[in-house]
Image (tube, rainbow, N blue to C red):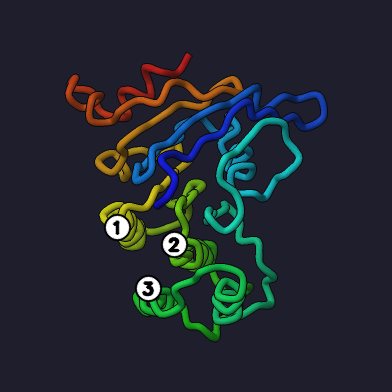
């Protein structure tokens, strides 16, 4: 990894007269596992859409763009008529995509390469979306509420995969209000509220005070 950090500054975004982000800034160390915590409606998805290069209509600066960043969105952005194999082929055409790893991960689900996206349950679509994003060889992996609609078995599978990515030195950023599954993975956490990100907290330091990450989050809410 050439970058020492994944940084962004002064991110502003409004929908009509409603300001969602009001100058959000952050810098996440390379190799870190960062939790962006916040209530529903706090702007987590809006921020990740910007950091993931989906939303380009904003004010501010981001130091890492394009194929250096992989992004698992809350809703799968591919045509529902596509088969899973076509989705993987698309990823291979446009990204540095590990197709062999993706197919191996898919084998651990009940989804086949020939399945059409529209025939998959919400949970199955989340599984495919995670695999597609995870298997892009990127400096940063962004995950927006990655455990939504997943059963316990695949939640565990995702957490295990992210442990593996951390061991490989990848930077992972998870926007979530679900904390328990990631409690021991976080190296850093920050709270998004009122359009701004709070200070980046060192998870190990938080734990050394006898606090859980959930305690830290609750205490940070205004």
Q: Residue furthest top?
A: 222
Q: Is residue 64 or residue 163 the one in the foreground?
A: 64
- Are discs 3 and 2 less than 8 Å apart at CB? yes
The picture places residue 95, in percent across and down from the top left corner, at 56, 68
Please give left or right for residue 28 compared with residue 12 in the image.
left
Q: Is residue 8 left or right of residue 222?
A: right
The circle on residue 168 is: 1
Q: Earlier in the sequence, mark 2 or mark 1?
A: 2
User: Considering only vertical position in the picture, is 34 above or below 159?
Assistant: above
Mark whose residue sits in front, 3 or 1:
1
Give the crowd class for mark 2: few <14, some 14-19, many >=20 residues within 10 Å.
many
Please tell me which residue is depicted at 23% across the width and 30% down the height of the picture: 204
Q: Residue at x 43, y 21 (%)?
A: 199
Determine which residue is flagged by label 2: 134
Query: How many neighbours does mark 3 have within 10 angstroms: few (below 14), some (14-19), or many (20 or more)?
Result: some
Task: Look at the numbered disc 1 and give the secondary structure of its residue.
Answer: loop
Q: Earlier in the sequence, mark 3 or mark 2?
A: 3
Left or right of 182? Residue 120 is: right
Report x, y in % for residue 140: 46, 50
Of marks 2 and 1, the one in the foreground: 1
Pointer 1 local density, CA inside 10 Å: few below 14, some 14–19, many at least 20:
few
Q: Residue 105, labelled with which disc?
A: 3
- Helix, strand or loop status at disc 3: helix
- Residue 89: give x, y in percent of width and height: 58, 79
Residue at the image position 25 percent from the left and 41 percent from the top: 184
Sooner in the amino-acid sequence: mark 3 or mark 1 = 3
Instruction: Give the Cα distance between marks 3 and 2.
Output: 10 Å
Quadrant assignment, res 33 = top left
The reply to whether residue 222 is in sight is yes
Q: Is residue 119 visible?
A: no
Q: Secondary structure at mark 2?
A: helix
Q: Quadrant of residue 17?
A: top right
């Amino acid at each position: 990894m050439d970058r020492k950090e994944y940084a962004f500054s002064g991110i502003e975004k409004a929908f009509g007269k409603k300001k969602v982000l009001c100058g959000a800034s952050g810098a996440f160390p390379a190799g870190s596992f960062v939790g962006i915590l916040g209530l529903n409606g706090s702007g987590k998805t809006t921020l990740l859409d910007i950091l993931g290069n989906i939303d380009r209509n904003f004010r501010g600066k981001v130091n890492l763009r394009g194929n250096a960043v992989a992004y698992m969105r809350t809703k799968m952005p591919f045509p529902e008529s596509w088969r899973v194999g076509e989705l993987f082929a698309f990823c291979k055409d446009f990204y540095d995509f590990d197709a062999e790893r993706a197919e191996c991960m898919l084998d651990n689900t009940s989804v086949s390469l020939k399945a059409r996206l529209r025939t998959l349950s919400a949970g199955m679509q989340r599984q495919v979306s995670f695999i597609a994003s995870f298997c892009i060889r990127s400096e940063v992996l962004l995950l927006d509420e990655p455990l939504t609609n997943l059963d316990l078995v695949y939640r565990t599978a995702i957490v295990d995969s992210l442990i593996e990515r951390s061991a490989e030195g990848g930077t992972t950023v998870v926007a979530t209000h679900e904390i328990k599954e990631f409690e021991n993975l976080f190296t850093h956490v920050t709270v998004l509220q009122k359009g701004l990100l709070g200070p980046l907290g060192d998870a190990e330091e938080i734990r050394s005070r006898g606090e859980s990450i959930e305690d830290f989050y609750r205490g940070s809410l205004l």
